[in-house]
Amino acid sequence: MASGFYPRARLRLAAPLLLGVWAAAVVLAPDLRLKVLLALPALLIPTALWTLEGPGRWLIGFFAAAWLLPPLPIPLGNSGPHVCLVFAAVGLLAGVLWASRWSIPKSPLNTALATLFVVLLASIGPAAFDSGAAVAAQSLARVALFGIGVYVFFFTAYGPGSGLGAFASIRGVYWFAVAAALFACVDFYFQFPTPAGFGPQFIWLDSGVYRRAQGLFYEASTLGNFCAFFLVLIAVCFTQRRSESPISRKALLAGGALFFTALVLSYSRASVVSVAVALVVLAWQKRSRLPLRRLALIAASSAAAGAFLVWRVFPVFAETYWLRLAASFDYFLSGNERLLSGRIASWSTLAEWLAAHPWQAFVGIGYKTLPYTNYLGVPVVGDNMYLTLLIETGIAGLAALVWLNIAILRAAARAARKSDAQAAFCGTWILCFWAGQTVQMLSGDLLTYWRVLPVYFFVLALAVRP
């Protein structure tokens, strides 16, 4: 007894001393980055323990952290590591702890999603061969980040998260998203200093040069795509009976104003086109239930309210934005390349290189290597998911993406016809939104939006799960 008592007694006496030393180390650390690193365990350990008490809790933490927390001020990657990756790791552990709850059937959607992930993973070999170990490591990291969304889908549809309530989950996700959009608007107004790397995306106004609204994603296109997703949610809710909508009308109106404003401030025209495509698909889906006039009135009144809000709060910006949209329409009618903001030059470079090296279309050069490798002579930003995947992952990658898009749309359309109201709601939402995504992929590398892609696959899982 004595031999066991004294070590435990010494441990109890030493624990306060160790905690005191740890606290002193945090206080005396010479710079902010070291302070953050030393203090992280105090937050992460209890958070991880709480998360593991329920199989779906890590999803709550992941979405909240991904949208509402900035990257850590640590020089690693483009903008520093992110806290949400801790929740992703906890999610993997949750999948192991509740391994008995997994049951993944064979289906075209499941096969297409797994195939795309495998093709992206296989492209690491060509990345290492053509561009070296450093670029290949970045490519592997990007594949892993895309894999988070794939894991969220299977975890929610066929794993331990399959018991999550659809409408309850959507309500929680919606309010996280509203908070993220609110911060994006406030950040644009005050132009807060960024704690980590961000996309150099600016707007030139008479009053000065301003960073485009990026929210806590620190990339304007990601914010625009994120806002488009929830604007489609709001549109779908207004076509439902109140009892079949997960969110109240007042909350939808308040959130819609914020999402529309953040979308406009992000300056993302492609996301506006994505929303327009989604609304057309929604109108087609609801043509037998709701008059087209009512759908058009809902869309027009929502857009007018958002436009008025932007004009009242940001009058100079609003004028510039509407002029930009008008100019874009003129460019479209005249075939002017300025409509695509220089993308034609990048696409021409990629097309010319591929024509000179057609054999590369069979193997690719490695996923997400174009912006970092000199293999083509200079780094190139593809800004076209289809062309980018053809260059980076070959014909197999492009075919896998097209297959996945078709599989998502077909599965969502089937879910939209289910008798279960919640599954049908989610199916309609993801069907309309992903139709817009397939179009927006022509002008953006949407699979790289890893902090928002998981919620898209989450809603898809809520729609298709058994």
Image (cartoon, grey):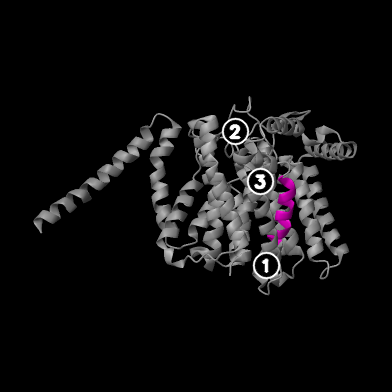
Residue 261 shows in this picture: no
What x and y, as percent, mark residue 108? 62, 61
Q: Residues within 10 Å of mark 1 (few under 14, many from 20)?
A: many
| Residue range of the region highlighted in magenta in the rendering | 429-441
Report the Cα–Cα distance between label 1 and label 2: 44 Å
Residue 49 is left or right of residue 165, and the answer is left
x and y percent of residue 327 in the render? 86, 36
The numbered mark, 3 or 2, whose residue comes first in the sequence reads: 2
Dominant secondary structure of the residues highlighted in magenta in the image: helix
Viewer-side residue, 436 vs 404 = 404
Residue 398 disc label: 3
Depicted 10 relative to depicted 206: above or below: below
Image quarter (top left, top right, bottom left or bottom right) of the C terminus: bottom right
As drawn, the label of residue 415 is 1
Which quadrant of the view contains residue 92?
bottom left
Disc assigned to residue 225: none
